[in-house]
Image (cartoon, helix red, strand yellow):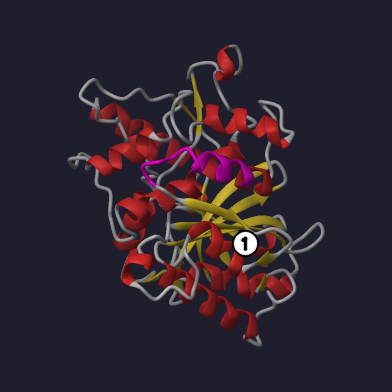
């Protein structure tokens, strides 16, 4: 069985990613979700980090959505899967920590199993394709219709309310503006809290910021600032891509964005009787895809995770520095009040 799986992975790699197999030989730093790597000396570490991210792709043969709806999301669910990936990264940071690493065949931690179960393709999983698609109806998106970054952000915000285990607050910053007071009200007790027992009331924050960085193409004035977002320790990455083709961007090297691609269809996974989840297909075990940053569609949503209020305060400080940087131009599309 192991040989069959490995053979399928090799075939998939060579058929679909021949141009990305070799990571670039460059002295420029590689940034992956707030971590800096050297492409010349840390290729194994880069691949380990990328492989440890949750990789959600099209699936087939899952229970019908809504009882009578689709049994596969091929062709329409790529942005929904990207939404799963960016929220999955938040859950990993929340329960396992950013430095946790996946290895094939290792004993699965209970927290990790719980995270995977939250995304299994069935109606009663917190963040399943079923839940996202059905919640999207309230956002004006019929089941089977493609989502944009803002729609999936709004849906994840609604679904997170029911996740009593993670106790996340998902805040979607609209109109290119992060209002600190709003976040303090929904996620914690506010910046003025001094007592130790009061600060414990802060709920881990997932901050999703829909942005438009141009009209039909990305405005080059925003490129350096977009790169800066991947350097922040709170980074969850960016969801976006090309028109009707979504990707989950996790970093960059030089002028290329590094991303996980949901556009391959795999069979739906069923948990084992002992509670373990067959998880090899939930981790991308080949070098990541890359695309030139200028190919990015200007409509994106950037994500950040702040476990504590101190981390959120640190994010505010860092993002203000980014906005003031003379080489960066996020002042127009993003304001922090």
Nearer to the camera, 262 or 333:
333
Q: Estimate the x, y position of residue 320 in percent, counting from the top left.
A: 59, 80
Is 263 drawn above or below residue 22 in the view shown? above
Q: Estimate the x, y position of residue 279 in percent, counting from the top left.
A: 32, 35
Which quadrant is the C terminus positioned in?
bottom right
Nearer to the camera, 137 or 293:
137
In reply to whether residue 150 is colored magenta, the answer given is: no
Name which residue lies at 52% across and 34% down: 264
Residue 172 seen in the current view: yes
Nearer to the camera, 288 or 32:
32
Outermost residue on the bottom side: it is: 326
Outermost residue on the left side: it is: 107
Is 235 drawn above or below residue 125 in the view shown? below
Q: Is residue 131 left or right of residue 30?
A: right
Mark 1 falls on what kind of element? strand
Name which residue lies at 30% across and 27% down: 4
Residue 25 seen in the current view: no
Name which residue lies at 39% across and 49% down: 91
Is 320 drawn above or below residue 220 in the view shown? below
Instruction: Name the image quarter holding residue 172.
Output: bottom right
Outermost residue on the right side: it is: 215
Q: Estimate the x, y position of residue 92 in percent, counting from the top left.
A: 36, 51
Instruction: Name the image quarter holding residue 143.
Output: top right
- How many C-alpha atoms fall within 10 Å of the one at disc 1: few (<14), some, or many (≥20)? few
Query: What residue did someone put label 1 on?
Result: 292
Outermost residue on the top side: it is: 68
The region drawn magenta spans: 154-166
In reply to whether residue 157 is colored magenta, the answer given is: yes
Q: Is residue 189 left or right of residue 101?
A: right
Is 131 drawn above or below residue 233 in the view shown? above
Q: Is residue 5 left or right of residue 255?
A: left
């Amino acid at each position: 069985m192991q040989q069959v799986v490995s053979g399928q992975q090799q075939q998939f790699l060579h058929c679909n990613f021949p141009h990305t197999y070799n990571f670039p030989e460059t002295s420029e730093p590689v940034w992956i979700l707030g971590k800096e790597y050297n492409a010349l000396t840390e290729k194994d570490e880069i691949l380990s980090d990328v492989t440890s991210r949750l990789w959600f792709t099209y699936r087939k043969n899952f229970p019908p959505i809504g009882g009578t709806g689709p049994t596969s999301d091929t062709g329409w669910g790529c942005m929904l899967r990207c939404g799963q990936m960016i929220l999955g990264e938040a859950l990993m940071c929340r329960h396992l920590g950013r430095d946790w690493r996946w290895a094939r065949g290792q004993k699965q931690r209970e927290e990790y199993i719980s995270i995977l179960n939250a995304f299994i393709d069935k109606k009663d999983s917190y963040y399943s394709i079923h839940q996202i698609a059905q919640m999207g109806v309230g956002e004006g998106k019929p089941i089977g219709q493609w989502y944009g970054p803002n729609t999936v952000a709004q849906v994840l915000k609604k679904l997170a309310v029911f996740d009593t285990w993670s106790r996340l607050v998902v805040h979607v910053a609209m109109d290119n503006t992060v209002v600190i007071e709003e976040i303090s009200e929904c996620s914690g007790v506010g910046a003025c809290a001094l007592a130790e027992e009061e600060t414990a009331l802060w709920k881990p924050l997932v901050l999703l910021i829909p942005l438009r960085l141009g009209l039909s193409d990305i405005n080059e004035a925003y490129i350096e600032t977009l790169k800066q977002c991947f350097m922040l320790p709170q980074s969850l990455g960016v969801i976006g891509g090309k028109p009707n083709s979504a990707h989950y961007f996790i970093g960059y090297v030089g002028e290329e964005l590094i991303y996980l691609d949901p556009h391959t269809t795999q069979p739906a996974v069923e948990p084992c009787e002992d509670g373990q989840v067959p998880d090899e297909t939930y981790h991308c075990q080949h070098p990541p895809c890359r695309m030139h940053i200028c190919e990015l569609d200007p409509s994106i949503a950037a994500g950040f995770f702040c476990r504590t209020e101190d981390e959120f305060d640190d994010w505010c400080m860092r993002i203000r520095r980014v906005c003031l940087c003379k080489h960066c131009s996020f002042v127009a599309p993003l304001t922090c009040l």
